[in-house]
């Protein structure tokens, strides 16, 4: 979580997410909340989008490691999880029997754009450090997914 909050080490995580999206491969990008701060009753897995929680503390949301593992493993076999970016927290309530409807309720990342759906457009790709732009252009050129003219486009630009 907090990937769109600029000026932190999260800038590099966001850059790596962009490389994954530009690769043309199937993916599910998971941005977990604070690990293992759950209360006993926080078993319901909740998936959010837009990276709106920026407290930098467990107030952003918590998630147990076993819940993260479940989401990662379940996403591998879920068509509904493909090409989605999500923030992951646990809320009060029972664990779901299946996560398929939770994945299905999420919006897919826009095809041809570098950032996740509803992410803030506050990190223009063409203003990135030269090595980051070079990496991105190499991935885009190798994937054949995005035309070169769009390789450095960000959402809402």
Image (cartoon, grey):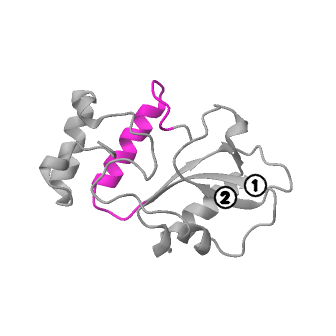
Whether tag 2 and tag 1 are in contact, CB under 8 A, the answer is yes
At 86% from the left and 54% from the top, the residue drawn is 40
The residue wearing badge 1 is: 91
Q: Which mark is residue 143?
A: none
Closer to the chain start, of discs 2 and 1, is 2
Crowding at dot 1, Cα within 10 Å, few <14 / some 14-19 / many 20+, comes out as: some
Single out the residue that lies furthest toward the right.
40
Circle 2 crowding by C-alpha within 10 Å: few under 14, some 14–19, many from 20: some
> Residue at (48%, 26%) from the top-left corner?
8
Q: Residue furthest front?
A: 156
At horizontal 21% and vertical 28% (from top left) the residue drawn is 130
Residue 76 lies within the magenta run: no
Q: Residue at x 25, y 44 (%)?
A: 153
Q: Secondary structure at mark 2?
A: strand
Residue denoted by label 2: 46
5 w.r.t. 31: above or below: above
Q: Position of residue 150 (x, y in %)?
A: 19, 49
Residues shaded magenta: 3-27
* Location of residue 24 with respect to 58 vertically, above or below: below
**Percent position of residue 97, x then y:** 72, 75
């Amino acid at each position: 979580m907090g990937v769109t909050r600029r000026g932190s080490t999260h800038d590099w995580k966001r850059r790596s997410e962009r490389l994954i999206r530009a690769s043309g491969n199937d993916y599910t990008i998971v941005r977990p909340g604070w690990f293992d701060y759950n209360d006993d009753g926080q078993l319901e897995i909740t998936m959010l989008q837009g990276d709106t929680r920026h407290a930098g503390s467990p107030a952003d949301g918590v998630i147990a490691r076993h819940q993260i593992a479940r989401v990662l493993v379940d996403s591998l076999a879920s068509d509904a999880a493909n090409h989605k970016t999500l923030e992951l927290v646990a809320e009060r309530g029972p664990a779901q029997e299946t996560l398929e409807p939770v994945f299905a309720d999420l919006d897919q990342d826009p095809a041809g754009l570098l950032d996740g759906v509803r992410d803030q457009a506050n990190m223009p790709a063409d203003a990135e450090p030269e090595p980051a732009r070079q990496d991105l252009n190499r991935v885009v050129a190798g994937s054949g997914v995005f035309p070169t003219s769009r390789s450095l486009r960000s959402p809402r630009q």
